[in-house]
Amino acid sequence: MAFGPSPTLFRHFVEQVRGLTGSVYGRRMYEVMRYWDEDHPEWNAAERDFATAWRNQPKWVVSRTLKSVGPNATLVADNVEAKIRQLKAELDGEIDVVGPELARSLTDLGLIDEYRIYLHPVVLGSGKPFFAGPRPRLRLQSSDRMDEDVIRLTYVPA
């Protein structure tokens, strides 16, 4: 982690995760987030709250290389489009998509209803771009100040 969110922004993420119906992860991001599967003695109350919310949330992990996933997670190795369409049809509420390559694939299939981009004044020199291919046509729906340094921009497909 090159930087961490402020306490205000971290609390926002705790509440966001609590409110999700579930999350669909690409393999790499899922492996990063597995950090929250085990308690760490140095965690503060907010970190424990996040871990609890993350553990309680259903997760679907898109991967052709993983053979198994952790608690409260389901491996999706093939028929990704059909599985995501099924989840969208059967579940009420928000399903988060986590991982740039997965997001691009689902964007290309027209399966993402909303994009939330957190604008934070930190420049990092590596990583995958949020839009790994051609940027989809988007329309700004809202902007919200999250704390003194971060703005959330919400876009929908145009």
Image (cartoon, rainbow, N blue to C red):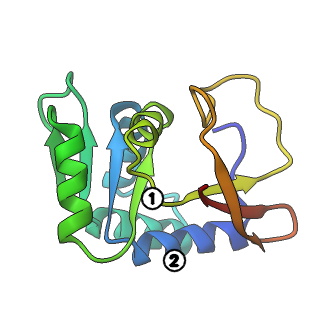
Quickly name the residue at label 2. 15
Q: Is residue 150 left or right of residue 8?
A: right
Where is residue 141? Give x, y as percent: 68, 68
Location of residue 142 by image quarter: bottom right
Rendered view: 34 above or below 115: above
> Looking at the image, can residue 65 be seen?
yes
Where is residue 66? Give x, y as percent: 19, 27
Q: Is residue 3 left or right of residue 113?
A: right
Please tell me which residue is depicted at 15% across the width and 32% down the height of the picture.
Answer: 77
Residue type at mark 1 is Pro
Question: Label 1: how many residues lie within 10 Å, few (<14), some (14-19) or many (20+)?
Answer: few
Residue type at mark 2 is Glu
Where is residue 129? Give x, y as percent: 63, 30
> In the depicted view, which residue is nearer to us: 88 or 50?
88
Please tell me which residue is depicted at 33% across the width and 50% down the height of the picture.
Answer: 24
Please tell me which residue is depicted at 35% across the width and 44% down the height of the picture.
Answer: 25
Q: Secondary structure at mark 2?
A: helix
> Looking at the image, can residue 70 be seen?
no
- Quadrant for the N terminus in the image: top right
Quickly name the residue at label 1. 41
Residue 10 is marked as: none
- Quadrant for the C terminus in the image: bottom right
Location of residue 151 by image quarter: bottom right
